[in-house]
Image (cartoon, rainbow, N blue to C red):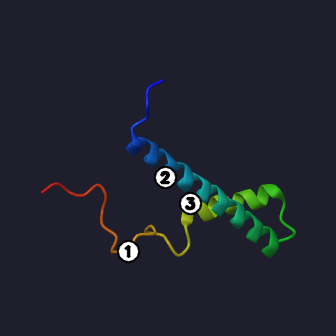
């Protein structure tokens, strides 16, 4: 069996961690929506979750510090 490049292995671990964190964030938001709106059906919860994921209130321009810039950047 061929050994895996340690850099690729580390990158794979970081990606798995990021995906696990995303999944946890979704689960937490679902739970929050259920607590705040107990009358909603599961379909309505999922619809609100998708809306939240698409609009990102408070992080409309991403999570990074700095100012928004056009993308792709214009050629010079």
Tell which residue pokes out farthest to the left in this image. Answer: 76
Q: Nearer the viewer, mark 3 or mark 1?
A: 1
- Residue at the spot x=44%, y=47% of the render? 11
Q: Nearer the viewer, mark 2 or mark 1?
A: 2
Position above or below: 74 against 4: below
Residue 29 horizontal side relative to residue 18, left or right:
right
Viewer-proximal residue, 18 or 72? 18
Q: Earlier in the sequence, mark 3 or mark 2?
A: 2
The CA distance from mark 3 to mark 1 is 20 Å
Residue 5 horizontal side relative to residue 14, left or right:
left
Q: On the image, which quarter does residue 54 sit in?
A: bottom right
Viewer-proximal residue, 15 or 48? 15
Residue assigned mark 2: 14
The CA distance from mark 2 to mark 1 is 21 Å
Q: Earlier in the sequence, mark 3 or mark 1?
A: 3
Residue 59 horizontal side relative to residue 75, left or right:
right
Viewer-proximal residue, 40 or 13? 13
- Residue at the spot x=39%, y=38% of the render? 5
Position above or below: 71 against 64: above
What mark, if any, has residue 54 been given in the picture? 3
Q: On the image, which quarter does residue 29 sit in?
A: bottom right
């Amino acid at each position: 069996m061929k050994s895996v490049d340690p850099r690729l292995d580390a990158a794979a671990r970081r990606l798995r961690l990021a995906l696990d964190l995303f999944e946890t964030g979704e689960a937490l938001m679902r739970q929050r929506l259920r607590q705040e709106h107990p009358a909603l059906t599961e379909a309505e919860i999922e619809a609100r979750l998708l809306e939240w994921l698409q609009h990102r209130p408070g992080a409309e321009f991403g999570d990074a510090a700095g100012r928004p810039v056009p993308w792709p950047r214009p050629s010079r």
